[in-house]
Amino acid sequence: MILGLIASLVLPSANDLGFLVEPYLQIGNQAEVKDLTLVWHDRPNRPVPVVEYRQGLGQWQKAKSTSQAVATAKVQPFEIFSARLSGLTPGSRFQYRLITQGVEVFSYWGFTPPAKSQSQRFAVIGDCGGASLGQAGVAYYASKEKPHYLVIPGDIVYDDGTVRDYRARFFPFYQRGVPSQRRGGNLLHFAPTIGVLGNHDIGSRNLDRDPDGLAYFYTFFQPLNGWSGATEPAATGSQINVQAFKSAAGANYPVMANFWTRIGDVHWVMVDVNHYVNLREEGLRSWIKDALARGQDAKWRIVMLHHPPFHSSPRHAEAKQSRLLMEIFEDAKVDLVIAGHVHNYQRNFPISVGDKRGARAEVLNRDDWTLDKSFDGKTNTKPQGIITIVNGAGGARLYDPQLADQPNQWKPFTTVYKAVFSFGIVDVTPQRLSYRQIDQNGELLDEWAITR
Ligand SMILES: [Fe+2]
């Protein structure tokens, strides 16, 4: 027994041998994405690997890494390392490796962000971190599509967006050494991943209950150009727990709840529309208008948020608050709104705001919006209005599958409704945005395009 005790104190367990979280790619804090940031999590006081990267057979370049300590309760203290990879050729591949004491401990390849006029492919996986077979199948087939980057319209991980949740239900599914339909894919190693807050991601704002909550704010490295008046999600709890969180999140909190970014021809605006946000607040609305105005020279404008403005599921029928933003989106010529929250896939007819302006109950509660029913995304690819989709079938338990075969039960604005685990793949050129929704078995569910 004594020997066993000594061994348990001295010998590393299998868990101690690898990273806490293997390297994953982030867009970092640039508004216009050119460089990438490589991030990994490790225990304190371990040798820090040297990061090297190269394109083709060129010289390996070294990237300087920095680290941020996370010392919240409920998890052992750990460090989040990040290294900026700069000087990459847009829209191509590169290799990276981590070397500790002369030994390569990790290596992979990644995609660099596409530039203007270059074609690009991104994946959409919503409401994903549920630790299900569906999540694994989606992750696997999304990886096979080799997107340049991945976007997640919220509810990144269940149940409450804690460090423990990320380690159990998020990272393992997208960092498989050997990808498979039953275990997941390898997206996070090669595709920079962008998230926005869903209700589960902010479910741990009470830091006395979940001291490692709101982990979004230190797991993701995203632009810090959000609304400066943001005070939510409010982190509550004892001073020691709140301070530990704030020190881990640093400048990311709370401004990273909203942000805009440009990746090649696509201008992205991400908005936190959780229940605590007042979408009538003029400061926030001005920020959204400004963030979209900065994308008026882009070929495509896409908004990503969690609660969909339009959907047909009885579940979450009350979630309509994003409708208050539709007039801003229309004025700014937004092409596509990507949401999640409702755990299935829904596509709506192109929607015009018409008389549904202002903060009136009619805007929230009436379903008789102006629709372009002539748009089918195949023979007619020029929508009159904004296309909104629900992409919440990435892994969490599906909602209202019975509706899939009952179009007469759908709201007037819904044209496609699929309640199987699935993800989106979007191919973008300056003239065409082509969308495919693919299920957990790799089968095509929906396909449509917008052309200029
Ligand atoms: Fe949600």
Image (spheres, rainbow, N blue to C red):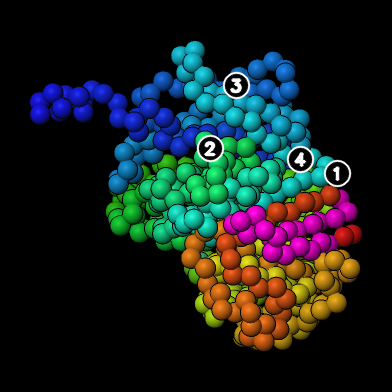
Depth order, front residue of 276/281: 276
Magenta residue check for 433: yes
Q: Residue at x 70, y 54 (%)?
A: 425
Magenta residue check for 446: yes
Q: Is residue 312 above or below residue 433?
A: below
Q: Residue at x 52, y 58 (%)?
A: 134
Q: Is residue 371 above or below residue 131?
A: below
Residue at the far top: name it. 102
Quarter of the figure that contains the N terminus: top left
Quarter of the figure that contains the C terminus: bottom right
* Labels 2 & 1 near each other (Cβ < 8 A): no
User: Looking at numbered disc 3 in the image, what kind of residue is underneath it?
Assistant: Glu
Residue that numbered label 3 is attached to:
52
Report the side of 72 relative to 343 (left or right): left
Residue that numbered label 1 is attached to:
117
User: Looking at numbered disc 1 in the image, what kind of residue is underneath it?
Assistant: Ser
Report the side of 406 relative to 300 (left or right): left
Real-space Cα separation, disc 4 to disc 3, in angstroms: 21 Å
Real-space Cα separation, disc 2 to disc 3, in angstroms: 23 Å
* Labels 4 & 3 near each other (Cβ < 8 A): no
> Few, some or many C-alpha atoms within 10 Å of disc 1 (few <14, some 14-19, many ≥20)?
few
Residue that numbered label 2 is attached to:
178
| Secondary structure at numbered mark 4 | loop
